Image (cartoon, rainbow, N blue to C red):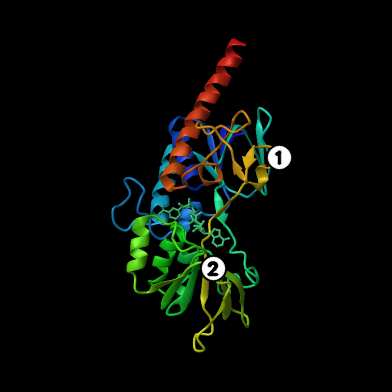
């Protein structure tokens, strides 16, 4: 461990790992801090189809991330598992206060990603882990041969619905409009799958049951009509998986880093409003949130760190 690193990277999703690969390869002294497992959202994604150069068959989030983590190791970044409590980003030396220690660096790359948005129905928090889930790869096998409902209409909802068909008896996608947002290839797969059907123009109002989810009220937005979905008596439960978008994990940086709707504002060099502080990946305000764009952000930020450090050194040298 160093007293002062050249860069600290917060978060080991694809953006943070890519930044650590590029920084390590440039011989920048690097500390990568992650509180849980590597990969962020991709660690719980079953199928990756669109990362260039991936294994053509059988690439999953975890297999892709495992290779990225090995590359980080190869290029020599220090790593710790710790949870960030507060950050002091504005000075020339940035301080990251974690549960187990305080770490210092000349620059910081924020790569803390995003997490699921709650469905927003009554009973949601009460029944989390008792029928309500946000992770198909984690919880699909609890619903083997049971009915499952997926809320959302984007890439995540459709991709995870397809995955859930490997376990569930039947999967119903509940979408608030009459058209999916997901890319055409995913839509085609979903429409062709006999196990999937749709509740269009619909939102979940409430879930309930005796200990576990046994009923759900779904409102049709066009007619206003409420349908009560009930668990089959023999099953005694059904699953409700929420995939309605993301909330950026940026609360810790509020008041220091400029944001819009919770997303950090950067320029195309990943620079935030604070000199020496960069932001990458899903937490950043941008058009396309994918593994490939997260990895690209990480590479750019690491190279900008290199430039920032060189310029700071030159200033010190020439006075
Ligand atoms: P998303 O693309 O933002 O889609 C969210 C979906 O949820 C939309 O269909 C939206 O409806 C619906 N929705 C939003 N708020 C809602 C609410 N309050 N009640 C009911 N429905 C609501 O989010 P995502 O699918 O979770 O994906 C997150 C990001 O990861 C996206 O950038 C996505 O492209 C990316 N991703 C990519 C892949 C891939 O490329 N293979 C896979 C997974 C995720 P409307 O359509 O009406 O707005």
Q: Residue at x 53, y 71 (%)?
A: 240
Residue 197 visible at all: yes
Q: Which mark is residue 3?
A: none
Asked whether 212 or 261 is in front, the reply is 261
In this view, the residue farthest toward the right is 255
Label 1 belongs to which residue? 255
**Up-down: is 169 above or below 153?**
below
Q: Residue at x 51, y 68 (%)?
A: 241
Crowding at mark 2 (Cα within 10 Å: few <14, some 14-19, many 20+):
few
Label 2 belongs to which residue? 222
The answer to which quarter of the image holds residue 189 is bottom left
Q: Secondary structure at mark 2?
A: loop
Of badges 1 and 2, nearer the viewer stands: 2
Asked whether 5 or 224 is in front, the reply is 224
- Whole-percent x and y of residue 222? 54, 68
Specify which label sits upstream in the sequence, 1 or 2.
2
Crowding at mark 1 (Cα within 10 Å: few <14, some 14-19, many 20+):
few
Residue 101 visible at all: no
Q: Is mark 2 within 8 Å of ligand 1?
A: no
Q: Classify residue 187 as left or right of residue 77.
A: left
- Whole-percent x and y of residue 311? 55, 19
**Up-down: is 80 above or below 316?**
below
Q: Secondary structure at mark 1?
A: loop
In this view, the residue farthest toward the top is 318
The answer to which quarter of the image holds residue 9 is top right
């Amino acid at each position: 461990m160093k007293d002062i690193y050249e860069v600290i990277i917060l978060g080991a999703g694809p953006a943070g790992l890519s930044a650590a690969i590029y920084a390590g390869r440039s011989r920048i002294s690097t500390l990568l801090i992650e509180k849980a497992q590597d990969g962020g959202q991709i660690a719980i994604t079953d199928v990756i189809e669109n990362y260039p150069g991936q294994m053509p068959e059988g690439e999953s989030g975890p297999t892709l991330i495992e290779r990225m983590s090995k590359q980080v190791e190869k290029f020599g970044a220090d790593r710790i598992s710790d949870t960030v409590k507060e950050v002091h980003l504005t000075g020339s030396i940035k301080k990251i206060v974690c549960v187990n220690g305080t770490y210092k660096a000349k620059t910081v790359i924020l790569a803390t990603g995003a997490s699921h948005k709650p469905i927003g129905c009554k009973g949601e928090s009460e029944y989390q882990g008792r029928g309500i889930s946000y992770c198909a790869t984690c919880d699909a096998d609890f619903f083997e041969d049971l009915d499952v409902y997926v809320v959302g209409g984007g890439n995540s909802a459709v991709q995870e619905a397809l995955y859930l068909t490997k376990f569930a008896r039947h999967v119903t996608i509940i979408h608030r409009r009459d058209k999916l947002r997901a890319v055409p290839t995913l839509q085609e797969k979903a429409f062709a799958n006999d196990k999937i059907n749709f509740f269009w123009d619909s939102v979940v109002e409430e879930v309930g049951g005796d200990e576990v989810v046994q009923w759900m009220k779904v409102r049709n937005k066009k007619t206003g009509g409420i349908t009560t979905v009930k668990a089959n008596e023999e099953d005694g439960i059904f699953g409700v998986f929420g995939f309605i978008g993301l909330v950026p994990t940026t609360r810790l940086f509020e008041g220091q880093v400029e944001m819009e709707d919770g997303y950090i504002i950067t320029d195309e060099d990943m620079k935030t409003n604070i000199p020496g502080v960069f932001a990458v990946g899903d937490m950043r305000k941008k058009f396309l949130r994918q593994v490939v764009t997260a990895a690209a952000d990480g590479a750019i930020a690491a190279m900008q760190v290199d430039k920032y450090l060189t310029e700071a050194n030159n200033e010190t040298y020439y006075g």
